[in-house]
């Protein structure tokens, strides 16, 4: 709504100044006035040009006074372009870093899955060995297994 009111005000102000400039130019032309010794025709043209300059100047002045965005666009455009370029560079760097982190995350997740599979395989292997060890203990006389005797025999042989 603010922008529409601003545009309508500028259009109305420009129209009023143009009308006044045209009226002044016509009166100067009819009275055959001259400015600085110029012919009335050229004096009328100069007044029309000055009126056009006033329209443009008044429009810019009004926009500058009323709108912060226009002030920024008129007086800080180069700084904004520099900041925008820097921000885009930062954004590109952040996107690259994000892709790297996502790739690392994916690799770590795959490693985690592989390790969980390996852990489960080893757990089952341990359970199987525990069951086998329990079976060997149950079958061994005096609760001693043949494997334990071999280990003790090797240890005694190393001590000599």
Image (cartoon, rainbow, N blue to C red):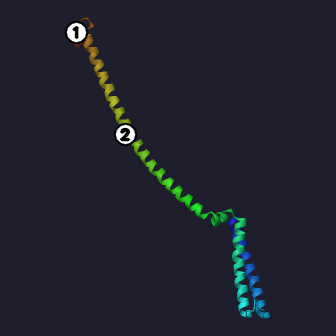
Q: Is residue 62 above or below residue 112?
A: below
Q: Give the residue drawn at x 40%, y 43%.
A: 104
- Note whether 142 is above or below 88 in the view shown: above
What number is the disc on residue 15? none
For the point 66% across and 66% down, the residue is: 70
Q: Work out whether residue 1 or residue 45 is closer to the camera in this orientation and state it.
A: 45
Q: Farthest residue toward the top?
A: 142
Residue 115, image x and y in percent? 35, 33
Which of 117 and 108 lies nearest the eye of the viewer? Answer: 108
State the residue at coordinates (75%, 83%). 21
The image position of residue 82, as x and y in percent, is 55, 60
Is residue 13 placed above or below 65 in the rendered structure? below
Q: Please give the residue where the numbered disc 1 appears in the rendered image.
A: 159
Q: First in sequence, mark 2 or 1: give its number.
A: 2
Please state the horizontal and vertical placement of residue 40, each as a whole percent of the image.
Answer: 74, 93
Q: Residue 110: which numbered mark, if any?
A: 2
Q: Looking at the figure, which quarter contains the N terminus?
A: bottom right
Image position of 63 (left or right of 158): right
Task: Tell me the SS state at disc 1.
Answer: helix
Q: CA distance from mark 2 to mark 1?
A: 48 Å
Q: Quadrant of the C terminus?
A: top left
Q: Is residue 81 visible?
A: yes
Q: Position of residue 33 (x, y in %)?
A: 78, 92
Q: Quadrant location of residue 136?
A: top left
Query: In this image, 144 relative to 106: left or right?
Result: left
Q: Callout 1 environment at 10 Å: few (<14), some (14 to 19), or many (20+)?
A: few
């Amino acid at each position: 709504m603010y922008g529409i009111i601003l545009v309508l005000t500028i259009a109305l102000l420009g129209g009023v100044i143009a009308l006044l400039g045209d009226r002044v130019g016509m009166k100067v032309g009819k009275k055959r006035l001259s400015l600085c010794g110029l012919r009335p025709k050229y004096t009328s043209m100069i007044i029309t040009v000055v009126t056009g300059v006033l329209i443009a100047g008044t429009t810019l002045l009004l926009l500058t006074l009323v709108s912060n965005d226009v002030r920024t666009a008129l007086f800080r455009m180069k700084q904004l372009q520099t900041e925008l370029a820097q921000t885009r560079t930062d954004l590109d760097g952040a996107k690259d870093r994000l892709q790297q982190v996502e790739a690392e995350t994916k690799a770590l997740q795959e490693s985690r899955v592989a390790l969980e599979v390996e852990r489960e395989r080893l757990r089952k292997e341990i359970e199987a060995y525990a069951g086998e060890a329990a079976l060997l203990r149950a079958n061994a006389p005096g609760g001693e297994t043949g494997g334990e005797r071999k280990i003790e025999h090797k240890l005694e042989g190393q001590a000599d």
